[in-house]
């Protein structure tokens, strides 16, 4: 398949399932094959920021809105045509077969975290929130940071939980839901939840910015809403 027949997409894991679900419609709309070049912000050489800085082709970039705006400021994503496409909440999971933890309130979540022997978090917005804000709000940062582990290099937190290497783990709900071997995927209590907006933009290296903008407009439309909602995130246009 030649490059000209593809739309290259770099997306965070949060929007990955929605992208795959909507790919057939996007392909009919654009007449081009949707190819996910990466499905994680991640860390290291294969992370989206490093791939973009190396000049790898990305027709569409889908990440947390704050990160997308940094990409725009750095000249890695075009300012014209970016759109919010979904809102995402953070969840917690345990290994399949483990008892269901009670995290229905701040006090309950605090107890679970203090009792856990190991806690996993991601390299994206959920992990940043957990380690820089949530732990401090719960007053337990000193007690739990030493047993908290960053899961990077594109690996999902849920996969590490499923292997039995973590007691509990946190990530965007849509990234936990598809992972086999984990259970009791529960959102943070409302008073502690952080809802993040994820946006799509045209990569500065795009080979066809007009087609990329049309695809992004579809992702932000009401027509795409039901498929997005089915993956555990909230569409911008329900």
Image (cartoon, rainbow, N blue to C red):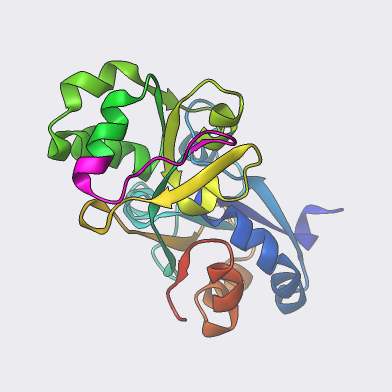
Left/right placement of residue 23 relative to residue 68 reads right
Q: Nearer the viewer, residue 230 or 78?
A: 230
Residue found 68% across the figure and 65% down from its top:
21
Residue found 31% across the figure and 33% down from its top:
112
Q: Quadrant of residue 142?
A: top left
Q: Residue furthest front?
A: 99
Would you place residue 30 above or below residue 133 in this image?
A: below
The percent coordinates of residue 131 (x first, y second) are 26, 32
Q: Is residue 204 visible?
A: no
Left/right placement of residue 203 relative to residue 215 reads left
Left/right placement of residue 99 relative to residue 230 reads left
Residue 176 covered by magenta stretch: no
Give the main secondary structure of the magenta stretch. Answer: loop
Q: Residue furthest right?
A: 1
Q: Is residue 51 visible?
A: yes
Residue found 45% across the figure and 41% down from its top:
100
Q: Nearer the viewer, residue 40 or 6?
A: 40
Would you place residue 69 above or below residue 169 in this image?
A: below
The percent coordinates of residue 40 (x first, y second) are 54, 42
């Amino acid at each position: 398949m030649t490059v000209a027949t593809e739309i290259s997409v770099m997306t965070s894991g949060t929007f990955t399932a929605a992208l795959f679900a909507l790919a057939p419609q996007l392909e009919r709309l654009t007449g081009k094959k949707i190819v996910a070049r990466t499905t994680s912000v991640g860390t290291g050489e294969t992370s989206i920021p490093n791939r973009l800085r190396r000049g790898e082709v990305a027709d569409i970039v889908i990440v947390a809105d704050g990160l997308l705006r940094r990409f725009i400021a750095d000249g890695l994503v075009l300012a014209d045509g970016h759109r919010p496409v979904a809102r995402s909440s953070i969840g917690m999971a345990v290994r399949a077969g483990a008892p269901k933890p009670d995290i229905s309130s701040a006090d309950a979540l605090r107890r679970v975290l203090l009792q856990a022997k190991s806690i996993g978090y991601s390299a994206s917005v959920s992990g940043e929130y957990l380690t820089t804000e949530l732990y401090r709000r719960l007053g337990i940062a000193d007690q739990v940071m030493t047993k908290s582990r960053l899961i990077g290099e594109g690996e999902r937190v849920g996969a590490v939980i499923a292997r039995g290497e973590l007691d509990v783990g946190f990530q965007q709900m849509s990234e936990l839901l598809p992972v086999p071997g984990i259970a009791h995927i529960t959102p943070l209590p409302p008073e502690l939840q952080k809802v993040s907006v994820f946006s799509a933009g045209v990569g500065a290296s795009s080979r066809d910015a007009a087609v990329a903008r049309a695809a992004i407009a579809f992702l932000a439309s009401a027509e795409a809403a039901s498929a997005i909602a089915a993956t555990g995130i909230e569409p911008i246009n329900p």
